[in-house]
């Protein structure tokens, strides 16, 4: 096991490149199951969630080639192998295997997904969608069993706006008979990306990116080549990092329109941002202002960036309130920031951050992916050395983070943990 060490307190500059979107990748790879010839996806991030999905594709009989971010999946030998345990538990997005395998084979057994612990993360809306399409769904000993004689298009109103349910229903519906309409659908860019891949495979989908998606089922889907969108959450993480410690950082491979809420909030705090076609230039302004944030579904401020933003606000002028309306318990990073001298209170779904403190290096633990990003930013802002454990979370979603930050001049490195440290972490 490794830990991350960061010598903080130094300004960073230079350019940094954003990788392909994790939350698209984890849906695009399962979507290849639906094709009847090889599908190639370009620009995938080098993260453990992608490696886990590659292994899952192979486990069900897929032939996979993955080199330099380009993955080709040949689904012709795939079978509906039950996956009640094992790798499916490693990532939340293994729930996309339900939609894709149900769509293709009309049956699937998938263990309830793992992933970041952000409080309760039900999948009732996914199941509501599968049932509306005609599937029988049961939960037996921690695995979801899905079976249908045939899938028939249906009108499905999501009671909660859910990225996962919207994509999963699309995956199940593209090969169903007749028309499916998803109402109150989520509008995230990752949904458009998945719909673009499916359309290139021959699916008939209209309205992805709006709150009503119409899908007319087709008989077959074929192989194609698709380029993934850049990761807006990784880009947003770098924007916040640049606002915290940057003396001019060029962020490359960005779709600025995906980040409007983040850009607006950083500007409100006094951060200087120049936007070009697919790049952003961000500099830490003088005297960061306190701001309040409320996370919302897209295009609102993303829940995935409230944790990194909290680190930044520890040095704002005044007191800020960050409220997470999506995951009200996504505050496990706060205890760790307190270890670093952060003055932050949590009240219900809100964190109240007292700005103008100087963070100090400490030993901290990443409890989930974006908590990890928050602690790395805090470590770069802090005086002294910070040690971050729980790197398996960071590795799930940030590609080559140490190399990318070293390229900006950060003093950051990975170190093997001693046996004693590993024991301490487990206790
Ligand atoms: N919800 C339900 N029932 C459902 C599904 C969701 O009540 O059936 C609730 C959730 O509990 C949550 C809200 O609806 O309060 C939104 O959840 P959503 O389904 O949109 O989240 P998700 O699809 O499980 C994706 C991302 C998350 C990101 C959220 C919100 C993936 C693999 N994950 O999760 O990303 O936080 O959308 O934008 O796409 C991350 O990248 O760190 C991460 C956790």
Image (tube, grey):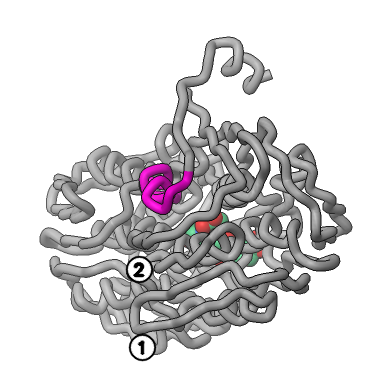
The residue that disc 2 covers is: 252
Question: Going by the image, does 86 lie left or right of 335?
Answer: left
Mark 1 to mark 2 CA distance (whole Å)? 30 Å
Judge depth for marks 1 and 2 and give the one in front.
Answer: 2
Residue at 84% from the left image edge and 58% from the top image edge: 354
Check contact, mark 1 vs mark 2: CB within 8 A: no
Tell me the tag on residue 206. Answer: 1
Q: In x, y percent, where is residue 116? A: 58, 46
Assign a secondary structure to mark 2: strand
Q: Is mark 1 within 8 Å of ligand 1?
A: no
Around disc 2, counting alpha carbons within 10 Å, would you say few (fewer than 14), some (14 to 19), or many (20 or more)? some
As for residue 366 lying within the magenta part, the answer is: no
Q: In x, y percent, where is residue 184? A: 57, 82
Residue at 69% from the left image edge and 52% from the top image edge: 120
Q: In x, y percent, where is residue 85? A: 45, 34
Q: Is residue 421 above or below residue 399?
A: above
Q: Is mark 2 within 8 Å of ligand 1?
A: no
Residue at 19% from the left image edge and 70% from the top image edge: 221
Q: In x, y percent, where is residue 363? A: 67, 31
* Residues drawn in magenta: 397-410
If the picture is divided into quarters, which one holds ligand 1? bottom right
Question: Going by the image, does 334 lie left or right of 73?
Answer: right
Task: Give 40 or 181, whichever is nearer the viewer.
Answer: 40
Assign a secondary structure to mark 1: strand
Task: Give 187 or 413, whichever is nearer the viewer.
Answer: 413
Question: Going by the image, does 68 lie left or right of 86?
Answer: left
Sequence-earlier tag: 1 or 2: 1
Task: Give 58 or 260, whichever is nearer the viewer.
Answer: 260
Q: Quadrant of the C terminus?
A: top right
């Amino acid at each position: 096991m490794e830990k991350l060490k960061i010598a903080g307190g130094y300004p960073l500059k230079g350019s940094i490149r954003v990788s392909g979107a994790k939350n698209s990748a984890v849906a695009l790879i399962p979507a290849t199951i639906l094709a009847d010839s090889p599908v190639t996806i370009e620009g995938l991030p080098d993260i453990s969630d992608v490696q886990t999905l590659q292994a899952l594709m192979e486990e069900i009989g897929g032939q996979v080639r993955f080199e330099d971010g380009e993955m080709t999946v040949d689904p012709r030998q795939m079978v509906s192998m039950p996956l009640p345990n094992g790798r499916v538990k490693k990532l939340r997005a293994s729930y996309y295997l339900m939609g894709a395998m149900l769509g293709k084979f009309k049956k699937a057994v998938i263990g309830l997904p793992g992933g970041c612990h952000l409080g309760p993360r039900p999948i009732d809306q996914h199941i509501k969608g599968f049932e509306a399409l005609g599937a029988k769904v049961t939960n037996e000993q921690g695995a979801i069993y899905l079976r249908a004689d045939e899938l028939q298009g249906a009108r499905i109103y999501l009671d909660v706006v859910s990225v996962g349910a919207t994509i999963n229903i699309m995956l199940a519906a593209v090969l169903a008979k007749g028309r499916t309409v998803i109402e109150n659908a989520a509008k995230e860019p990752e949904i458009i990306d998945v719909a673009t891949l499916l359309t290139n495979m021959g699916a008939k989908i209209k309205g992805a990116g709006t709150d009503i998606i119409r899908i007319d089922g087709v008989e077959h889907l074929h192989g194609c080549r698709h380029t993934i969108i850049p990761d807006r959450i990784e880009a947003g993480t770098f924007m916040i990092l640049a606002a915290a410690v940057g003396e001019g950082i060029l962020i490359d491979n960005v779709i600025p329109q995906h980040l409007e809420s983040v850009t607006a909030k950083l500007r409100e705090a006094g951060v200087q941002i120049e936007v070009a076609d697919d790049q952003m230039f961000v500099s830490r302004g003088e005297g960061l202002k306190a701001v309040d944030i409320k996370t919302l579904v897209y295009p609102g401020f993303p829940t995935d960036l409230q944790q990194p933003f909290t680190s930044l606000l520890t040095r704002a002028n005044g007191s800020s309130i960050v409220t997470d309306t999506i995951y009200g318990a996504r505050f496990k990073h706060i205890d760790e920031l307190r270890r670093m001298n952060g003055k932050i209170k949590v009240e219900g779904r809100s964190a109240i951050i007292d700005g103008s403190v100087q963070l100090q290096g400490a030993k901290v633990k990443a409890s989930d992916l974006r908590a990890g990003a928050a602690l790395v930013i805090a470590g770069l802002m802090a005086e002294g050395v910070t040690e971050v454990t729980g790197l398996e979370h960071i590795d799930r979603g940030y590609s080559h983070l140490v190399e990318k930050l070293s390229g900006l001049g950060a003093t950051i490195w990975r170190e093997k943990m001693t046996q004693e440290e590993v024991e301490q972490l487990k206790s």
